[in-house]
Image (spheres, grey):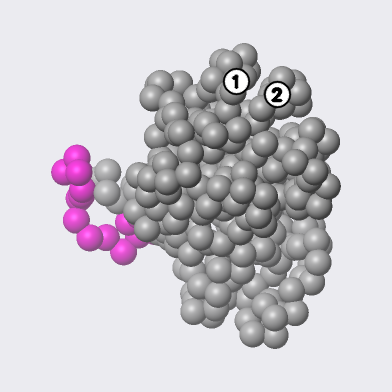
Amino acid sequence: MRVFVTWRIPEIGIQLLRQHFDVTVYTGDEPLNGTALVNHLKGMAGVLAIFHNRFTADVIEQLTTVRVIANMAVGYDNIDVATATRKGICVTNTPGVLTEATADLTWALLLAVSRRIVEGHQIMATDNFPGWDPLYLLGAEIYGKTIGIVGMGRIGSAVARRASAWNMPILYTSRSPKPTIEQKLGARRVSLEELVHNADFISIHTPLTPETHHLFNTNIFRQMKPTAYLINTARGPIVDENALVTALRNHWIAGAALDVFENEPHPHPALKNFPNVVMTPHIGSATVETRNRMAELAAQNLIACLQGKQPPAIVNPEVLLNDNR
């Protein structure tokens, strides 16, 4: 069987696939989408994809041989899962293996924006440090402040565990209660409105769905504390960047730190001009160890699906239950 890898990934994933299949790895400079993606998948039994490949309903309808889409990401908002399921195509993802790395980056961003780390570096790099001053480059205290976690899944829970070391009261939103987190960390499940009214730091970890698209909009920003910071390492479109720019210009919030963007790879142009904004290029899972584990898990998922076995992480298990292949 032939399988296609839509981008360059760690070699561990490629080598694992080559033990079982004829593997083609895309080497172009632009992510494949639309007709180009369909054309490259002709005759392929499976595809190992990345976040930037958009498997729309139209694309999936044209896949005549593909039996599995193995997404090398936790999120799968780039795939029309309902259409894939109807066509009997397995959709898999890579949860768990990137939890700690993403939680670490969340805290790196929180610290960077609240303690003005990037501003300080730029001052030193341009030799503009005037000398110590009691009122110079003042930031925000973190210890003992309230953190609000929007989405208490694996990553949100890992962020919460780190917050406990800073003695931070933890508020969270979630589709279901998390009694273990509540018991161990004293976290409290609240409405989004109560969270944004009371949190000093708000960290987004909810999936991107039609319900969470632009969840953070003008109305929400107006409810946040003027001393509060927003951190987003989940998905860019959860935040309305036009509304965020307005909030920053009007000092409705103290700052923002973003690893993901509404129109990746391009942030809103105005975000580049705010000293109280820290941006990183979607590197939440970007450690050698984590990216290796992601590539390995994505390959294992693809192999298992094509062999008719239960993959380690499948989004639509009903496909396997109805598989008559």
Give neighbour class at mark 1: few <14, some 14-19, many 20+ (Cα, 10 Å): some
Asked whether the residues under the numbered discs 1 and 2 touch, taking CB atoms below 8 Å apart as contact, a structural biologist would say: yes
- Gap in Å between the C-alphas at discs 1 and 2? 7 Å
Q: Quadrant of residue 173?
A: bottom right
Instruction: Look at the numbered disc 2 and give the secondary structure of its residue.
Output: loop
Q: Amino acid at mark 2?
A: Thr
Residue 216 appears in view: no
- Which residue is identified by label 1? 42
Residue 267: mark = none
Q: Position of residue 35 (x, y in %)?
A: 62, 14
Instruction: Identify which residue is drawn at 77% across, 38% down.
Output: 88
* Lower position in the chain sequence, tag 1 or tag 2: 1
Q: Is residue 207 left or right of residue 286?
A: right
Instruction: Look at the numbered disc 1 and give the secondary structure of its residue.
Output: loop
Q: Amino acid at mark 1?
A: Lys
User: In terms of depth relative to the viewer, which is nearer, 8 or 42?
Assistant: 42
Q: Position of residue 301 (x, y in %)?
A: 58, 50
User: In terms of depth relative to the viewer, which is nearer, 273 or 281?
Assistant: 281
Instruction: Identify which residue is drawn at 60% across, 51% down.
Output: 304
- Which residue is identified by label 2? 64
**Region of the chain picked out in magenta, as a range:** 124-139
User: In terms of depth relative to the viewer, which is nearer, 86 or 257?
Assistant: 86
Residue 133 appears in view: yes
Q: Is residue 196 left or right of residue 112?
A: right
Q: Is residue 95 above or below residue 157?
A: above
Q: Is residue 270 above or below residue 94?
A: above
Q: Position of residue 104 (x, y in %)?
A: 45, 62
